[in-house]
């Protein structure tokens, strides 16, 4: 159980270490899976289905085999369609893109963590107490000396039998003040140092979180915290989203996970994860909002709704939707990569072979690599039964596709012997998949059946029988119906 | 991205099940619908807001099983349960009996190129009318089995029959025969006799507009695509695939298999639409062997499909499907006709050129 819990909220190094796809910003458990994803989604020849290793390889293949020019990488984000970058797995990703990605992961991670903490009222896992230690505190030697002096003075006082004891505020504060380093079991500082560009964001975040969470830890917890927060404390929080997040959104770099966290932000804190913005929630990639029970007495009042609103004026919902992910979901690649996005489908499906198939079962998906990947991530072994509805366009190998071949062969073998045929059919359907036919009459078509009903039956002039006459008697009656 | 009004429903649909839908050859908004309620309906589908306009309805003596346009947008032919093939003047409403079969007439098609009217009936005959020669009566071709569906290209006629038989006739020879045989019963040998590549009863057949081949569908959720060219290379290209199936919510791992009632090729792209008993319409790329798209489920079984001559609209006839062991059937109140407006490339497969 502990292990599982951890899976839900991987720490930031884990997130940063995950391989991800340059073309669609999706991340994966394993480099191998990433590579197979790229081959299936981005480097697959749409003509013959061949999977190449790189975009360059695909381009050469298209050129030589199909005499066509590849202009863009399939299923990729709008700004990543170019062929000039040679990507294989994680290799070849431009430095700036990689940095942006990492930054996004980090901000997303802390965003989500903050959301989680706000929603649950829990202090963060491990030593990350509510973000107080987010900002590494650097103490000058002079300060250290001063504190040491204070400490010594207190010790001396205690030793002298002072009654104030260790309950003094000073005593309590000292661990908080002293221990940023120890709290930073999480790699925050390295991240901060490593990605200089984001320092502003991070710093802003730190102060935001501090403003947010410090009060609950003040020993005398007096009154609802919401009212005890003077507005100025929120200033950092307010300024933070425009600086850090919105920028990312506008660049269209945010992926599924982070907006998910984000939209949790906009709703009431008690949101359950899958509803966040309709975006998929794949636990291994980015932590979902917590499934922990809410603690209303502590968590909910920590941020009163109006304060939430106030704090997040920065990334307004509308703006986010228009230039963020919702716009891109139109892209069929995206919706196929993120199947749970089925709300849009509810209206009607504009994309070819993705959503519906994924929803109604992977067996029908022509290209089920995605499903396999998802299952692999979920730790399920992929069923090897996946039978493509249509073979992935291999004209010359038509017979290799499961469906046509048996049909073609069988129809030649078995003649019109009905019982045998049915038996064959039964055998085959058992072998494949049990089926239940809505209409299975081999002799009469539905129209003929309907024609027999009194409702529709027609009695020709001078006849008393219904119109449907057995074919054998027909020559005799032919021509009697003249008009 | 897509506009909201991509499809609309005809406000005045037939009162009972739809048997066939046909767009006019020269107008993309003129639609004929034949129905089991003994009428043929003529719609103008231009006014989408109002759900189209019912121009006229033409009463028949019995349920109408098929309808098609004739030489122009004002001439139509109908085939019905009253065993008759009729010509309808859509302007005056005048109906002329072209011929009478010995059983209900299932399908009727008109070949503009050869001025030929061809009807097929459950009496296992085809009637050929040479309309360029009004004095000539029809000639009859006997078939080995009951025909279920007809489709033609500019040069060929495909007849799908029970016992999974498929005959392909060349219209040039049949039209020659018709002009010579004049009213007699002939035993014209088809150009090709085939057995369906599908194991179950053929439900519908539709020819590729480019005269290359045809698609058939069966009652067992499958569609086959074949080519006319009898060379082994072309025959090796034929394929079949499963569609219009759904996992059975009750039985684990069981699929409910629906009949594929309707097939229609897009007039320009090599793609075709299939409509099934599951109420789904899917577009397929016949050449690339891929599904292009699948539309949201209709409230009932899809009975008929037709692309407009310019390929801009797809008419979908929806009514309850007849199912196994059904004692009673009525499409009353549950019959709808939808007109779906297709975007430029909506029906265009990636591989199509």
Image (cartoon, rainbow, N blue to C red):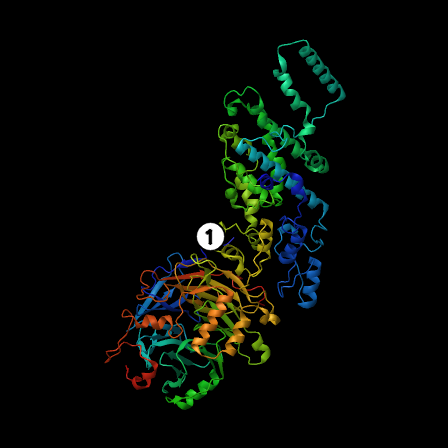
Q: Residues within 10 Å of mark 1 (few under 14, many from 20)?
A: few
Tally of marks: 1
Horizontal side of A182 relative to B235 (left or right) equals right
The answer to whether A345 is drawn above or below residue A288 in the figure is below
Label 1, secondary structure: give it. helix
Hey, which quadrant is residue B143 in on the image? Answer: bottom left
Horizontal side of A146 relative to A254 (left or right) equals right
Q: What residue lies at 61% left-to-right and 29% top-to-bottom?
A: A129
Point out the residue furthest to the bottom here. Answer: B180
Q: What residue lies at 72% left-to-right and 37% top-to-bottom?
A: A194
* Tag 1 subunit: A
Hey, which quadrant is residue B80 in on the image? Answer: bottom left
Q: Mark 1 points at which residue?
A: A346
- Image location (x, y in percent) of residue B208: 51, 73
- Image location (x, y in percent) of residue B328: 30, 66
Horizontal side of A243 relative to B100 (left or right) equals right
Look at the image and tell me whether residue B210 can be seen.
no
Q: In which quarter of the image is the N terminus of chain A?
A: top right
Look at the image and tell me whether residue A452 can be seen.
yes
Could you say which is closer to the camera, residue A216 or residue B38?
A: A216
Point out the residue furthest to the right here. Answer: A141
Q: In which quarter of the image is the C terminus of chain A?
A: bottom left
- Image location (x, y in percent) of residue A28: 63, 49
- Image location (x, y in percent) of residue A102: 67, 42
The answer to whether B4 is drawn above or below residue A269 in the figure is below
């Amino acid at each position: 159980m502990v292990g599982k819990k951890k899976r839900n909220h991987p720490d930031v190094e884990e997130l940063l270490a995950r391989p991800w796809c340059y073309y669609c910003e999706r991340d994966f458990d394993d480099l191998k899976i990433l590579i197979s994803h790229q081959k299936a989604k981005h480097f697959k020849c749409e003509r013959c289905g061949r999977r190449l290793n790189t975009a360059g390889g695909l381009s050469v293949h298209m050129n030589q085999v199909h005499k066509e020019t590849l202009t863009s990488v399939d299923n990729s984000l709008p700004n990543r369609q170019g062929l000039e970058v040679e990507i294989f797995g994680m290799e070849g990703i431009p430095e700036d893109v990689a940095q942006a990605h990492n930054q996004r992961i980090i901000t997303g991670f802390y965003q989500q963590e903050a959301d989680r903490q706000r929603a649950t009222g829990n202090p963060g896992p491990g030593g990350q107490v509510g973000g107080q230690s987010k900002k590494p505190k650097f103490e000058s030697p002079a300060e250290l000396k001063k504190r040491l002096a204070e400490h010594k003075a207190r010790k001396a006082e205690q030793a002298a039998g002072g009654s104030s004891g260790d309950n003094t505020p000073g005593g309590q504060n000292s661990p908080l003040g002293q221990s940023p380093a120890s709290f930073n079991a999480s790699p925050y500082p390295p991240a901060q140092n490593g990605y200089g560009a984001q320092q502003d964001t991070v710093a802003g975040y730190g102060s935001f979180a501090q403003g947010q969470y410090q009060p609950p830890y003040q020993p005398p917890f007096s009154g609802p915290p919401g009212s005890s927060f003077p507005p100025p404390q929120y200033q950092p929080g307010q300024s933070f989203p425009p600086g850090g997040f919105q920028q990312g959104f506008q660049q269209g770099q945010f992926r599924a996970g982070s907006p998910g966290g984000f939209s949790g932000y906009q709703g009431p804190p008690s949101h359950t994860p899958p509803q966040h913005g309709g975006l998929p929630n794949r636990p291994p990639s980015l932590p979902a909002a917590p499934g922990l029970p809410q603690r209303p007495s502590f968590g909910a009042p920590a941020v009163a709704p109006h304060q939430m609103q106030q704090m997040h004026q920065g990334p307004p919902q509308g703006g986010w939707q228009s230039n963020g992910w919702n716009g891109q979901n139109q892209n069929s690649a995206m919706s196929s990569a993120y199947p749970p996005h089925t709300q849009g489908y509810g209206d009607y499906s504009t994309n070819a072979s993705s959503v519906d198939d994924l929803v109604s079962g992977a067996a029908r998906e022509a290209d089920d690599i995605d499903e396999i990947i998802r299952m692999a991530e979920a730790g399920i072994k992929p069923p090897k039964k996946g039978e493509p509805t249509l073979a992935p366009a291999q004209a010359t190998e038509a017979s290799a596709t499961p469906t046509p071949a048996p049909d073609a062969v069988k129809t030649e073998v078995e003649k019109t012997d009905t019982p045998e045929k049915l038996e064959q059919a039964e055998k085959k359907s058992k072998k494949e998949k049990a089926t239940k036919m809505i209409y299975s009459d081999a002799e009469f078509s539905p129209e003929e059946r309907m024609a027999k009903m009194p409702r529709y039956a027609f009695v020709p002039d001078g006849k008393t029988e219904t119109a449907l006459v057995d074919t054998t008697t027909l020559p005799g009656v032919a021509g009697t119906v003249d008009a | 991205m897509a506009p909201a009004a991509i499809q609309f429903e005809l406000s005045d649909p037939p009162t009972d099940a739809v048997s066939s839908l046909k767009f006019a050859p020269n107008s993309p908004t003129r639609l004929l619908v034949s129905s089991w309620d003994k009428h043929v309906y003529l719609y103008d589908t231009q006014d989408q807001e109002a759900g189209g306009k019912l121009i006229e309805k033409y009463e028949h003596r019995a349920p109408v099983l098929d309808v098609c346009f004739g030489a122009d947008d004002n001439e139509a032919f109908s085939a019905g349960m009253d065993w008759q093939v009729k010509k309808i003047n859509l302007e005056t409403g005048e109906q002329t009996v072209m011929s009478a079969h010995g059983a209900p007439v299932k399908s009727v098609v008109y070949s503009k190129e050869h001025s030929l009217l061809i009807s097929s009936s459950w009496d296992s005959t085809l009637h050929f009318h040479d309309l360029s020669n009004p004095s000539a009566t029809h000639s009859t071709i006997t078939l080995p089995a009951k025909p279920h569906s007809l489709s033609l290209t500019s040069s060929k006629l495909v007849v799908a029959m029970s016992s999974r038989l498929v005959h392909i006739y060349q219209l040039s020879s049949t039209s020659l025969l018709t002009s010579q045989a004049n009213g007699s019963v002939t035993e014209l040998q088809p150009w090709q006799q085939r057995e369906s590549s599908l194991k179950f009863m053929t439900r519908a057949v539709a020819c590729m507009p480019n005269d290359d081949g045809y698609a058939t569908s069966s009652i067992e959720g499958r569609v086959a695509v074949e080519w006319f060219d009898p060379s082994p290379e072309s025959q090796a290209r034929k394929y079949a695939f499963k569609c219009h199936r759904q996992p059975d919510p009750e039985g684990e791992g069981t699929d409910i298999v629906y009949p594929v009632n309707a097939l229609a090729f897009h007039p320009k792209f090599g793609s075709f639409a299939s409509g099934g008993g599951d109420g789904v319409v899917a577009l397929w790329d016949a050449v690339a062997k891929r599904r292009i798209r699948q539309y949201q489920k209709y409230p009932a079984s899809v009975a008929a499909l037709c692309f407009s001559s310019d390929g801009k609209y797809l008419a979908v006839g929806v009514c309850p499907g007849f199912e196994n062991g059904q004692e009673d059937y009525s499409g009353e109140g549950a019959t709808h006709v939808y007109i779906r407006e297709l975007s430029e490339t909506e029906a265009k497969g990636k591989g199509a050129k």
